[in-house]
Image: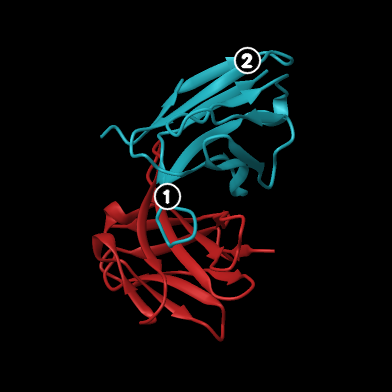
Chain colours: A cyan, B red
Amino acid sequence: NAGVTQTPKFQVLKTGQSMTLQCAQDMNHEYMSWYRQDPGMGLRLIHYSVGAGITDQGEVPNGYNVSRSTTEDFPLRLLSAAPSQTSVYFCASRQGLAGAYEQYFGPGTRLTVT
Amino acid sequence: AQSVAQPEDQVNVAEGNPLTVKCTYSVSGNPYLFWYVQYPNRGLQFLLKYITGDNLVKGSYGFEAEFNKSQTSFHLKKPSALVSDSALYFCAVRGTMDSSYKLIFGSGTRLLVRP
């Protein structure tokens, strides 16, 4: 199993550009989520999905869109990048919804918006 | 609303000494509690979790955590620190009755173990 994979590892964008951060998992996990990590702020939840076709907002959803057309993939879209979106982005997945399943994290994408 | 507090930005300890990284939480009902570790330029790795039962939970790499319901705390501990334990540690919580299934993280505590 590759686990949770993310691409790209690094990205530099100009303000106003759009891009998609890719996330995939090969563990048939129901639950997937996106976090951003900023110094002193810990991990903040952006969006999450409880299954294919079902997504919802987390703590900091503004400026980001997600979709979940398959169990495996959960891309995060930045429609018009802003410097405030400079961060490290982590995708995570876990097996189930209601139990105490641990989450598995991808290696992260470091995004800089200039 | 669920929340997690990690009151210390950094914890410094000498190698061989015991370490404690503090975490307090707030949820409606009972909690699921987790500790994760992040090494430089890496994703987060699971260390241990509390579901129910024994208040002392043992996890990976010799770490353990003590659940205290009255103090709503879940402190991470290790009897003898190693230099290789130096990393960023995150506490996380989810309410067992939370229908959104969201896992909420604290702000993280940097552990520095000096030789």
Q: Residue at x 68, y 47 (%)?
A: A59
Please, what secondary structure does the residue beneath circle 1 have?
Answer: loop
Nearer the N terminus, badge 1 or badge 2? 2
Question: Which dot marks residue A13?
Answer: 2
Question: What's the CA distance linking mark 1 and mark 2?
Answer: 29 Å
Q: Is residue A65 above or below residue B115?
A: above
Using a 10 Å C-alpha cutoff, classify the residue at mark 2 as few (fewer than 14 neighbours), some (14 to 19) or many (20 or more): some
Looking at the rendered structure, the kind of residue marked 1 is Gln
**Residue A101 in picture, x, y percent from top left:** 40, 57
User: Subunit of mark 1?
Assistant: A
**Mark 2 belongs to which amino acid?**
Leu
Give the crowd class for mark 1: few <14, some 14-19, many >=20 residues within 10 Å.
many
- Give me the disc on residue A103: 1
- Residue ranking furthest to the bottom: B70
Residue A28 in the image, given as x and y percentages of width and height: 37, 39
- Label 2: which secondary element: strand
